[in-house]
Amino acid sequence: MLRVGIIGLGDISKIHLAAINENAHAELTAACDIDPLLENSVKGVPFFTDYQAMLDEIVLDCVHICLPHYLHYPAAKAAVENGVHVILEKPLAHHVTDSRAIVELEEQHPDVKICVSLQNRLNETVEELASIIASGKYGEVKGVKGIVTWHRPKSYYDAKPWRGSMELAGGGVMINQSIHTLDLLQWLGGKIDSIRGSIDCLLDYGYEVEDTATAHIKYQNGATGLFFATNSNSENSSVEFQVNLKKAILTIKDSILTITNENGKKVRLAEDRKLPGTKFYYGASHVKLIDQFYQAIMEDSNEYIHVKDAQISMEMIHLIRESSDTKQTMKMNLFHDQT
């Protein structure tokens, strides 16, 4: 039985706690949050307001880090240096510098595993899409498209002001709402050659972070990509992700994967599971990701989403921001080679 802790009891922690409690291989052993009132949400286990104290006093096999972005690196570093495996909520960090530091942390501690919660890779629609691309049945990738049109009211930022701070959040719609889409664009599209992007604030909330971003991506395989994300929509619409293959177009929308063949016929291929009682965009794949990581710990395997995998989308965000500032196309020269 894995002894599991959790650091941070905000919104996303509810998904993690449910997954921990339902997993036959894990037991919640400790919890931490700076708000002592949240102890009531994890009754029956030791509660801390300092994560270093928790790591020092409680023997843990794995810890879930569900903190604001700027705390991801220091908390992960503390856990790894204590020999505790880590499930780290997205994004990898609040800034490319800290994300690169986590890459180094992973390399310096090869016996400690760090899994990043890019769980949309494990959605049923994405798994089927990835399998079809890999099969080559419909030819090579010609283009990819990822569109996120969501809504965030001013109260979303007012309730937790760190979300609107570049220093603390590291950005807005790119790093917070559409990081999964950026990850899929690079994971399914191929190795990136260059990016030309632009960011803006269409809403007059008065916060520093962008609410809208767009980018054109060129891949080393000759394909192109389009990325568009905004928090200025009137509602949270379904994310749309599309891959244009030589002989077919595959589209994920409303959590359903369809294929349109050369004759224009559209066929439904897969649908994502949904987690009842949660926001639709959370999906249900946290449970799969967490169970996969627990299995990796117990079996000492590498079957999980590594830091180096998550680093690529952080570099994409960095380049889109730089491109917007300089009005130039930016080459993708990764801190480490794309894998």
Image (spheres, rainbow, N blue to C red):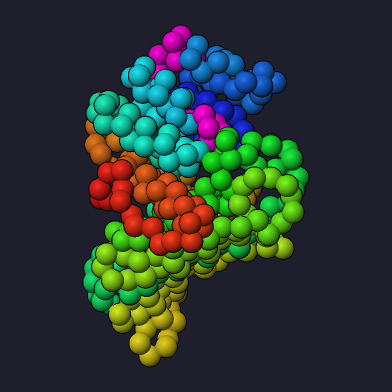
Residue numbers of the magenta segment: 54-71
* Residue 300, percent from left and from top: 24, 32
Where's residue 275, x and y in %? 55, 50
Q: Nearer the viewer, residue 250 or 272?
A: 250
Q: Which residue lies most toward the top here?
A: 57
Q: How many marks?
A: 0
Q: Residue at x 38, y 58 (%)?
A: 330
Residue reaching furthest to the front: 326
Query: At which x and y percent is residue 149?
Result: 61, 63
Q: Is residue 1 left or right of residue 326?
A: left
Asked if residue 107 lies left or right of residue 197, the reply is left
Position of 265 relative to 58 (above/below) = below
Q: Is residue 255 visible?
A: no
Rendered view: 188 above or below 119: below
Q: Is residue 137 visible?
A: yes
Picture residue at 38% right of the left edge, 45% below the top = 310
Q: Is residue 268 above or below residue 4?
A: below
198 falls in the magenta region:
no
Which quarter of the rendering shows the N terminus?
top left
Q: 302 above or below 319?
A: above
| Residue 63 is inside the magenta segment | yes
Q: Residue at x 35, y 61 (%)?
A: 194
Query: Residue 101 or 44: which is nearer the viewer?
Result: 101
